[in-house]
Amino acid sequence: MEQLASLIAATLSAGTPLLLAGIGLLINERSGILNLGAEGMMLIAAAAGFAVGFHTGSATAGLIAGAVAGVLFSLIFSGLAIGLVTNQYATGLALTLFGAGLSAFAGLAYVGKTVPFQTNFAIPGLSEIPFFGTALFKLHPMVYLALLLTGVVAWVLARTRLGLTIRAVGESPESAHAIGFPVRGIRVGTVAFGGACCGLAGAYLSLIYTPLWVEGMVAGRGWIALALTTFATWKPWRVALGAYLFGSVTMIQFALQAEGVEIASQLLSMLPYIATIVVLALVSRNPAFIRLNMPASLGKPFHP
Amino acid sequence: MPELAARLQLTGISKRYPGVLANDNVSLTVAPGEIHGLIGENGAGKSTLMKVVYGAARPDSGEMRWNGAVVQPSSPAQARKLGIGMVFQHFSLFDTLTVVENVALALPGKLDRAQLARDIEAMGRRYGLPVDPSQHVYSLSVGERQRVEIIRCLLQQPSLLIMDEPTSVLTPQAVEKLFGTLHQLSSEGVAILYISHKLEEVRTLCSRATVLRGGRVTGVCNPREESVASLSRLMIGAEPPRATGVAREAGADQLIIDHLSMEPQERTGKPLHDVSLVVRKSEIVGIAGVSGNGQNELLSAISGEDARAPARSIRIGDTAIGRLPVVARRALGLAFVPEERLGRGAVPALGLDLNTLLTHDTGLTRHGLISHAAITTLARSIIERFGVKAAGPAAPAKSLSGGNLQKFIVGREVVKSPQVFVVSQPTWGVDVGAAAQIRQEIVALRDAGSAVLVVSEELEELFEICDALYVIANGRLSQRIAVRDATIEQIGELMGGAPASGAGAEVQHAAA
Amino acid sequence: MLRLEARPVPSKLMGYAAPVIALAITVVFGTLLFLALGKNPAASLRVFFVTPLENARGLSEVALKMIPLLLCSLGLAICYRSNVWNIGAEGQLVVGGVAAGGMALLASPDSTRAFFVLVLLAGMLGGMAWAAITALLRDKFNANEILVSLMLTYVGGLLLIYLVNGPWKDPKGFNFPYSKTFDAAAMVPKLFAGTRLSWGVLIVVVVLAAAWIFLSKSKAGFRLQVAGQAPLAARFAGFSAREGIWASLLLCGALSGLAGALEVAGPLGQLTPQISPGYGFAAIIVAWLGRLHPGGCVFASFIMALIYIGGELSQSRLGLPAAITGVFQGMLLLALLTADTFIHYRLRKA
């Protein structure tokens, strides 16, 4: 029982970076922008967050630094893809390649270092409850924050004028422009939000989840988060569901290894990637269904 | 009274875009309560002028006065604040949002969906524009979408309403209703600027009109005192020529569509219900109808771009082609000119020479390699024979004007002397001279023995060149109607989806 | 205020100038980076752009790096011209290398000298098989090829690590994660004694010519590109979009797989946990920098090879980590995209 509880806890922890990044990218994409630079933004934020956390001794400072790094990096994307109308796919890829290179370069000094703060938490009282205490209430605050963020994003999209505007811009930037919305400004905003979320996710990985800096440590999670938005058909709560599903896939490999199952670790490590491919194929199988849910202008250039 | 300030007064507006002077010293005055026509061909500068008024473009020179005061709206939002409303030709609606949400986006203030829904319904009742506020826009018909646009404008209480080519998507009956709404608005003091290239309409509706040609004002008149011919002279400098041909006895059935029913490929598409038609050798058959009633679906099924139709439901002569790929249909003598020229009929960035490779399957390649000499010769011969204005055979398709590109695409198919020639919106957005030439080519093809199917929104065009007509509405096709027996009213009723009258329709139902 | 204004006709001049401008921007940023790190910029840039070209050995190393970059980038150019966003050339290269390695391990001292042909074929088939997964999922399941091809790159990398740690580990290798070294018959013959250059160079020249003919002269290549540029026009003309997906991905898989095979049966001579320092990703940059044109790819892969070697040299000569290669690669692509804007737009005072 206790083992199952810690497995649930581990799943929630593992799903959190995916949820954070996924929810940010979802807002991006609802406004019509596809930022393939997610992986790069997460890497640079992981490095920056770790560096700040390491020197200040504060996880919060590290997380904030990660978010800031994510936003700054997202501005490169905005400047090119929105300002100069470059191809969104190519620009995102460039950002990922640049982020991978720069983080490896800048993070070199921190390889092998550990962070000087506690990463264990417990909610007083609730964490004492048998089973549920371990499963749900001994997690890092970021886990709960990610869920709260999902709720806020869902509410904004469905109920507020801001959400309506974002959806309208993603549906038809030409129409939104014609009736007078600052399409590019709105998109820069959503991309920055996506950058902040990916930044938080990256810093969470290097400061809390792992916690140490290794080159390329994001290991494709940015790409999986991108796949999640499709999996979720651009609906916030489904991103959460998908993120925890993938979290559990990551955990299965550890659970199996702990059980002493005789499978090479490399083969088990393939699981999240293979799962992404399978899920993507299953969800995308019906093109009409995807088109119905996908923001109509996603990835298309817009020049007023 | 005339001393009172005009609602809108433009003086000496000029606007230059790269390579073109879109507006050249244009002046225009609209009084309160006046319905003012702005007429001109495609590319005459109407849209640019309206962009200036609506704050979407800044003029290089000139002055705009609003109720006497000099203004220069720098954004549509600012123009709306002044009281200028605009109904766009290509609607600025959001498909996946509901009617209420669409309207809410254009209105300032708090988001109160329930109240707004009531407002929309009230406005609809007042002006005869019924619409369900909770519907998603993609599920609405084109006419309903226009109503949403108009209501969205009216809720902002505009004192000037700009209508950009509003009737191109409406049936004749719906046009009458729209005119009723516009008259009611003008009697309440709203000025209306009515943009159109349809001279008949402007003569019915407007009390004054400004005519644009090549970016300049060529006349200001009371259209009711003018004839279509005199307006046409102001607009294009000549009277429109008519296509002439020698009608021959139609021959054997060439293109047959036999009880075709089909689900659409796109979510916004229209299903086809039990469509049957026949085009015989040496005749031109037209399909009339408001866009979006199944024309695209039907044409894709004929061209082979959508090859899901039951094989025998589409035939060329005796050959079942419903499931054949595009290339096999071309080999049987089918040629098709789609509605979209750039991106479908031609690849925008490629030269005219390479664009011939899209539909010419033989004689242009050797051992799988493209023969540059052959495609250049072919492109040059099309350019010369059809008088296409282009920098040369290698000029990119997108460098041509709409009319010239259409001449090239029509020419590319005509030189193959197709057995069956299918063309969609042959003169859509094309200048009058090129339009006349294209119609003449279509008639000549018929005279040479081809079976021709023309799909068009322009009833006048269909009446001019066709021998027989069908009407498409909501994915259903009417009975065949000989053009010499048809009236505009009758066709208009069918376009509105009126239950097909006459015994023929009942036979069709019985058969289904 | 400046604003972008669409050019009536795209600028041909900018099309050629953009890569040069991008390179210049990258050099400027590089200079600033070296200054910030307290290095002499002139000496540092020399390490990147002059030192590798000073002697025959250096030149042959540059050529050696150009081979995989050029092969992958030609495949990617075909994909991108067909509007198929394959970013998994790295995975296709690795799996091609794995397949080639598997074949090479079958060779014995008495195998015929032509055995290496089988090794190369195995590599091409391996790369094609890996790319075929992406094509299949895109074609039958409408799955996004960007994500699938990238995920497969991770899977391919893990597959290689698994094999060299498990079934294919050299039993006499002191437990290092390497396969045994291949028999001579499995190795691609050397072109000149004393260098590491092999017949791979000749193969690349042939591939280059074939790619040029395919893209610029053949009807098949034309069909692919129409499908890429204007999908509706392709459907109108009856050119199959499915053909475009399959053909471009299989070609790219074959070329990337060949690159992997030439690496393992060339300079490496055995399977190791890492057979490519990101050639497949760098080739994305090469393809864009080379204007998706075979000739351009030659120039671009030359530049990229210099950046790779410069990165290696800067470790010993400048005391900078080799990771600086990645920084320059990313910068180069970002600069290129910026410069590319001005092919279609120009700046105007608003």
Image (spheres, helix red, strand yellow):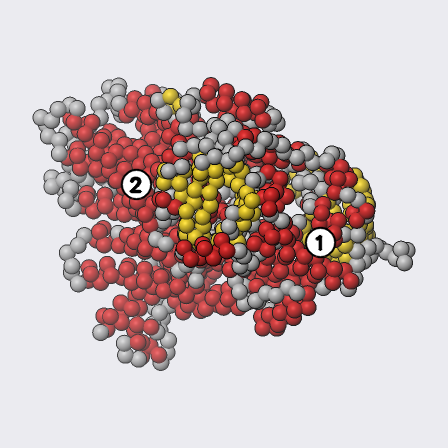
Q: Nearer the viewer, residue B305 or B492?
A: B492
Q: Position of residue B263 (x, y in %)?
A: 41, 53
Looking at the rendered image, the disc whose residue lies closer to the viewer, 2 or 1, is: 1
Residue at (24% x, 35% y) in the render:
C125
Left or right placement of residue A108 versus residue C346 in this view = left
Q: Secondary structure at mark 1?
A: strand
Q: Quadrant of the N terminus of chain C?
A: top right
- Image height of A79 relative to C54, above or below: below
Q: Residues within 10 Å of mark 1 (few under 14, many from 20)?
A: many
Task: Give the image location of residue C32, x and y in percent.
Answer: 51, 38
Label 2 is placed on what type of residue?
Answer: Ala
Position in image of residue B245 (x %, y %): 60, 31
| Left or right: B8 in relation to B373 | right
- Estimate the spatial distance between the alpha carbons at disc 2 and disc 1, rounded to whole Å: 54 Å
Q: Residues within 10 Å of mark 2 (few under 14, many from 20)?
A: many
**Residue visible at 79% across and 59% down in the picture:** B33
- Whether residue A297 is visible: no
Residue at numbered disc 1? B162
Chain of the residue that carries numbered disc 1 in the rendered image: B
Disc 2: which chain? Answer: C
Q: Please state which amino acid type lies under the numbered disc 1.
A: Ile
Q: Nearer the viewer, residue B409 or C195?
A: B409
For label 2, the residue is: C131
Tell me, yes or no, whether dots 2 and 1 are on the same chain: no
